[in-house]
Amino acid sequence: MVRRGFLVFLSALAWPGAPARAADVEAVEGAILGGIDVPAGRARVLARFPLGGAPAVALAFAADPPEGERDLLAVAAAGRVVALEVLSWRGADGSRLYTRLSVVPDGRRLRLERSASAPRGRGFRREQWTDYLAWQDAGPMADAPVRLVLAGTWQAGLAAQRAGVVASLAVGLRGVPPALIAACPPPCFPV
């Protein structure tokens, strides 16, 4: 019994608490990771790497809306946020999105390998694809697909969302404010 009580005590210390909801982002104290201010919920450094010759860092943090759990990926280089993407999503409806991040050997692009699924009828629809983001010396990372993105795919939906986020990043943000998080909504998986 003493051992069980000790393990419960340790797990209570290790558990980060309830994640912040999107509506509560302003009230959440931020964490400074890699010189960039991000919301503190599930905040972590994913990787450090050179990007276009500049030191860069990939950060992840929680930005949960009421209908699911979402982690966002922020890429910071040259003292500013240069990309903001959905890293993972778990919707209350059973939809899922997972992203695996890697640096392309040329040192100027990031590879985002995506896997998504959403309930359709009695089963699930699944899609897998790879997005590429290219380093731009004077601004946010640009969408850099290696082939034409097919209309109506989930990849096309995330690409359209990315275009809206890029406009918000053009001002050279040194953090991730609530308005930027709002510009990166949860993924929508149309039929």
Image (cartoon, rainbow, N blue to C red):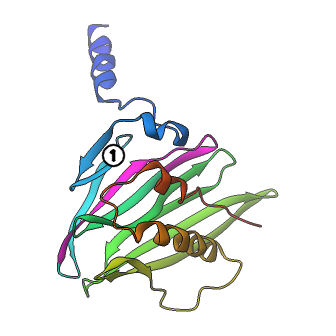
Magenta-colored span: 54-70
Q: Position of residue 50 (x, y in %)?
A: 19, 75
Residue that carries the numbered disc 1 in the rendered image: 43
Tell me the residue at 71%/78% (across/down).
152
Task: Give the left or right position of residue 156, taking residue 112 as reference.
Answer: right
Give me the residue at 58% from left, 64% from top. 116
Asked which secondary structure carries label 1, the reply is loop
Q: Position of residue 13 (x, y in %)?
A: 28, 24
Of residues 106 and 34, which is closer to you in this image?
34
- Residue 181 placement, left or right of 11: right
Label 1, residues with CA under 10 Å away: few <14, some 14-19, many ≥20: some
Magenta segment main secondary structure: strand
* Residue at 37%, 61% in the rendered image: 74
Residue toward you, 177 or 155: 177
The outermost residue toward the right is: 121
Above or below for 54 versus 69: below
What residue do we see at 44% from left, 55% from top? 72
